[in-house]
Image (cartoon, rainbow, N blue to C red):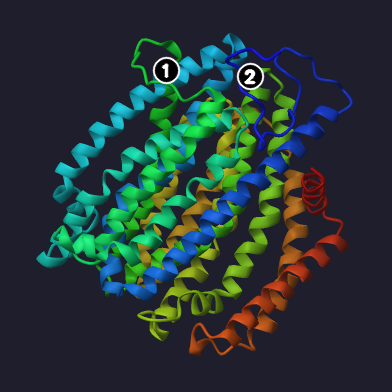
Amino acid sequence: MRAPNTPTVSEDETVPDATGPGEPRTDDGRDGERASGAIARRAGLVAAGTLTSRALGFLRDVVLAAVFPKAATDLFFVAFTIPNALRVLLGEGAVSSAVVPVFSEVRAEEGEEAARRYFAKLTGLLGLTLLVVSVLGVLAAPALASLYATGYLDDPERFQTTVELTRWVFPYLFFIGLAALGMGGLNALRRFAVPAFAPALLNVALIAAAFFLVGPATGLGLPPIGALALGALVGGALQVIAQWPAQRRAGLLRWPRLDLKDPRVKKTLRLMVPLLAGFGVYQLNTMLGRSFATFLPTGAQSYIYYGQRVVEIPQGMFALAIAAAALPTLSDLRARGDDVEVRRLFGYALRLTLFLAIPSSIALGVLAEPIVAVGFGRGEFGRTEVIETAASLRWQAAGVWAIASVRTVVPMFFAYQDTRSPVIASAANLVFFAAVSLLLMGPFEHVGIAMGLSAAGAAQLLVLLVLLRRRVGRLGLRAVVLGAARISVAAAAMGGALWGVARLGAWNHGATWPNVGVLASAIAAGVLTFVAVAAALRSPELKELLDAVRRRVKR
């Protein structure tokens, strides 16, 4: 029989990836193989959910580009800077990275019920904090807008609109913070499906808002673009509500409690503060980029934003997926003191990330103009917008491999409950980004900011690897480098195939059906070429991915 408070195994939960708490590891390597396979399967599930969200996000951006002029979207993107940065900060990093290791520790040492009580206390504390911060953000909207929209101070109308939009979107922080905590608790229990798919609801809400909330927005005294602010609030609430059934089944849906004396809560806060600083420094890049772009001609905000949205599709598909799937396993193994297996799984996760990230960098660079032309080339988005956004995308794509690797490396520090080292690396990222952007935005305008983003990602990765080597010893990077070399050969061949087919498109005509066909053909040719060359080079990463797909299909 099952104990009353023991949750049933969810449909998205895979078999255990290693031995249970207190059990000895066998020496035949089967536990390690199961752990690797579990990470690959979980990453696939998370990637599917993230792909759904990114695809809807891309559709959302297509709608916004076609419905609203770039002068209006510039204002919304600036107003949404801080709430969106905090969404990424909380939803994709700080909360889960602090909660999962401590939740796993409580669960292993004190049992399931203690872990649920701990989670209820966190919910109460975080909910109250988010409510206070949201109210303060609404009241301080003019001061906040003056920080990241400095270039608008000389235009009172644009600045005031930015302030009003900021007031309306800032409460989104309350909802996304609670949603992020729920995702962390479910991930710690190996329940990945709902956390993976829930973020898509924000994009659904924003798409609907563009069509149906313009009237209510103008009725509230907002410009038409204010419909998106209302949509953000609806989307945030939906992300919280969508998790309630899964949380109830897992025993996590309880009345919040406040207990600042709980040692586990204090430990989580100690972990979360430097995590917020580390991830926050990274998000400052976005805010700095927005601030820099306010000094550039109209459209710069949108060119950078749309380029970022495209590169986030592959990053979300695998980088975040692999990191989210690996962290609970790494934390469990570290809690048992199995450092050898921790390092082995880290090497596996990094190789898997690069296997997908390197070809993504090349593909997005080669297909930058075709992707933007087909994705956005309609309505208010003309030929000039396509060319400028493609230039931004091309240089942001150059850093996809580095930024994806950063998101895979950072969970290693969290598994060891080391939250200071990522802060140091993030600070290096910020300094490098500011220096490169300021140096290059003069001659290259918004493209200089895109160059700064990619260069800063590479610098951060280098610093992280150096710090991790000092923290845990040898990392087995020789196998990672050899794997990256194989992947680069296959990706180069893929790039040639993409370029050859893409030449057939008439991209100056925008989103026409013939161009859609050429782009689809180019992608198909590129994928087939990459897989064929990787197979010829006997890439173990390809075999591992195909094996994971076969196992999931059989289930």
On the image, the x and y values in percent for residue 202 come to 42, 52
Q: CA distance from mark 1 to mark 2?
A: 18 Å
Quadrant housing the C terminus:
top right
Q: Quadrant of residue 437?
A: bottom left
Q: Quickly name the residue at label 2.
A: 335
Residue type indicated by callout 1: Val
First in residue order: circle 1 vs circle 2? 1
In the rendered structure, the answer to whether residue 520 lies left or right of residue 286 reads right
Q: Residue at x 15, y 48 (%)?
A: 143
Q: Quickly name the residue at label 1.
A: 265
Q: Residues within 10 Å of mark 2 (few under 14, many from 20)?
A: some
Q: Quadrant of residue 385?
A: bottom left
Residue 411 visible from this viewpoint:
yes
In the rendered structure, the answer to whether residue 166 lies left or right of residue 530 reads left
Q: Disc 1 vs disc 2: which is toward the camera?
A: 1
Quadrant housing the N terminus:
top right
On the image, the x and y values in percent for residue 405 come to 60, 48
Which secondary structure lies at badge 1? helix
Q: Which mark is residue 9?
A: none
